[in-house]
Image (cartoon, rainbow, N blue to C red):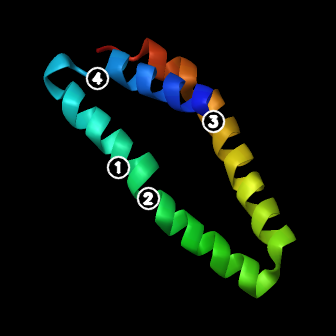
């Protein structure tokens, strides 16, 4: 998780224009730290309704699908004009 967060932060700072870098990093921080309680609440609701195995499994599946989707688009993001 630390590697992913550091990589994402580095990538955002490299592609963001200098005049917007602070705003981009603050939105990144809000997304990762500020939204965690909502994800925990949703995960708890799913676990209560469908069971722990379904909650953990569906969370893992969503993370895997998102990682695969991002991996297919990373080259285009790197090659995008600044």
Compare marks 4 and 3 and give the one earlier in the sequence.
3
Gap between marks 4 and 1, in whole Å? 17 Å
Residue 9's x, y, as percent?
43, 27
The circle drawn on residue 44 is: none
Which residue is situated farthest in the right direction here? 53
The circle drawn on residue 35 is: 2
> Is the residue 37 above or below the residue 15 in the image?
below
> Is the residue 35 above or below the residue 12 in the image?
below
Compare marks 1 and 2 and give the one earlier in the sequence.
1
Gap between marks 1 and 2, in whole Å? 7 Å
The residue that mark 1 highlights is 30
Residue 16's x, y, as percent?
28, 23
Gap between marks 4 and 3, in whole Å? 22 Å
Compare marks 3 and 2 and give the one earlier in the sequence.
3
Question: Where, quadrant-wise, is the N terminus in this rendering?
Answer: top right
Q: Residue at x 56, y 73 (%)?
A: 41
The residue that mark 3 highlights is 1
The circle drawn on residue 16 is: 4
Check whether the beta carbons of the residues at disc 3 and disc 1 lie within 8 A of each other: no
Gap between marks 3 and 1, in whole Å? 16 Å
Taking depth in this image into account, of 79 and 48 the one nearest to the observer is 48
SS category of the residue bearing label 3: loop
Gap between marks 3 and 2, in whole Å? 16 Å
Question: Where, quadrant-wise, is the C terminus in this rendering?
Answer: top left
Label 4: how many Cα within 10 Å (few below 14, some 14–19, many 20+): some
Q: Residue at x 21, y 36 (%)?
A: 23
Q: How many marks?
A: 4
> Is the residue 11 above or below the residue 2 in the image?
above
Compare marks 3 and 1 and give the one earlier in the sequence.
3
Residue 4's x, y, as percent?
59, 30
Label 2: how many Cα within 10 Å (few below 14, some 14–19, many 20+): few
């Amino acid at each position: 998780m630390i590697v992913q967060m550091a990589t994402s932060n580095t990538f955002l700072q490299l592609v963001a224009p200098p005049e917007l870098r602070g705003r981009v990093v603050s939105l990144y921080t809000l997304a990762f730290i500020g939204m965690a309680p909502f994800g925990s609440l949703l995960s708890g609701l799913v676990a209560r309704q469908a069971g722990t195995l379904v909650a953990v499994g569906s969370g893992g599946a969503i993370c895997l699908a998102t990682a695969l989707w991002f991996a297919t688009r990373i080259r285009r993001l790197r090659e995008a004009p600044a």
